[in-house]
Amino acid sequence: MPVRLLLVDDEKGFGEILTKRLGRRNISVTSVLSGKEGVRALRGQDFDVVLLDLKMEDLDGIEVLKIFKIMAPEMPVIILTGHGSEQAARDGLALGAEDYLMKPCDLDELLGKISSAIQKPQGGPHGTDQRPGGG
Amino acid sequence: MSAHSDQRPTGIFLAAAGLVLLPYLGVIAAFWFMQQSAAPFFDLQDNASYLVLLALVGLGLAGIVAAAFMLRKHLNREPLQDPLAMQDMNEQFIEAGKMASIGELAAGIAHEINNPVAIMVEEAGWLDDLLQDDPEMAKSPNFEELKRALTQIRTQGARCKEITHKMLSFARKSDLRMQNINVNTMIQEVAALSEKRARYANSRIELALAQDIPPITASASEMQQIFLNLINNAVDAMENKGGEITITTSKSKNMVEIQIADTGAGIPKANLARIFDPFYTTKPVGKGTGLGLSICYTIIKNMGGEINVASQVDVGTTFTIRLPVTEAKNHDQKVAGSEKHSQR
């Protein structure tokens, strides 16, 4: 059974390509382009892990994180942001995020973080050995 | 500033008191003398009384002149000093404001660049995924060339990331907190930022950094300001003919020594003594405030360090900075020294 991942990022191109690449690695990605859509998606189904951007037009990533932590406190959230402020990402950690990564990131590094966030190696991401060198 | 405002009323008071009291005392003394001597006021026969009277009047006149002179000096000097001090402070505020604006701009640019670069890198990774999966592609004569191009896209993407991260580390808001700083790392960061400007001026930056440099205790943004100032000055000095900037680090006793040497125009001996003076500049109007080296000097002195310059016209200039090494017991301590610096 693939890992169910929710990607909340207003960069459409990034969501599309990450969906394809993670899909090949047995991760089923639901990509949404705003915080509000993310909240709606989480109402509709459960996810094993979330990748969350911080700077979005409608709802700030930190606000989305607070809502997610109320809706599904056990669901790990990884902050993935291109925003300059590493401090904001650290604030996210203080609010219960599992980890953070700055864009652009290496795919293998991202897979490693997803894997340790969901803490179930048997159902976790795999396939990183297929293509050494990552993203 | 507070020292000035304390001294000024005292000086004026003394001058005014002198102006009134000295001639008054002179006149009182003269009358006393006349009363004591039975001789007539203008008795030229009495040479002694005449001379004493003359001396008293002379003393009174000298008092008036001295007091007037003091008063004039105080009234003239103070208004001249204040605007200079104000201008100095204003310049520093403007500089701090500029740095903050650059910081915000850099953070914005980093965000705007990181997202497209992330997409670019992922798309290249996706193409690589597809190439790996298609055995027919591996037979193509262009396979190796495609792989090379994709690797190049990823390498250049990583380079963009390095640039935006350097911008961000430079753009951190002016932080006067004292912390342990690795001088070599900081010089590498600042040199990377200045490289492009140096290249435009046909110059190269060479680093000769010793490996065993211990940390120093300083404010990161102030250290950046020092290195940027000195490197920019070096680039300016070589603007016409190009040349080489060599940055060397070494350890001597309990000091870290940093040398920034250029092969530029050099500084004439007559100017050398004044280069650390505030507002002294030989740059064209609008190009330099004359504060750069003065600020460097103040920061370094406040840190207990020293800065020297050696220069020869048409050969080049070398600035040597010596900064005290962080004491072992303070290594893990964040020293709160912002108060000392904020008074500058």
Image: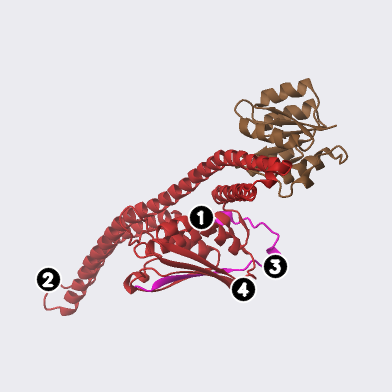
Chain colours: A brown, B red
Image quadrant of residue A24? top right
Where does label 4 land, which residue?
Answer: B254
- Distance Cα–Cα, label 4 vs label 3: 11 Å
Answer left or right for B73 relative to B184. left
The stretch drawn in magenta includes residue B293: no
- Distance Cα–Cα, label 3 vs label 1: 31 Å
Residue A113 appears in view: yes
Q: Quadrant of the N terminus of chain B?
A: bottom left
Foreground disc of the pair 2, 4: 4
Image point 55% across, 61% down: which residue?
B187
Q: Are marks 1 and 2 on the same chain?
A: yes
Q: Secondary structure at mark 1?
A: helix
Q: Secondary structure at mark 3?
A: helix
- Distance Cα–Cα, label 1 vs label 4: 29 Å
Earlier-in-chain disc, 4 versus 3 = 4
Q: Secondary structure at mark 2?
A: loop
Q: Which residues are magenta?
A: B314-342
Earlier-in-chain disc, 1 versus 2 = 2
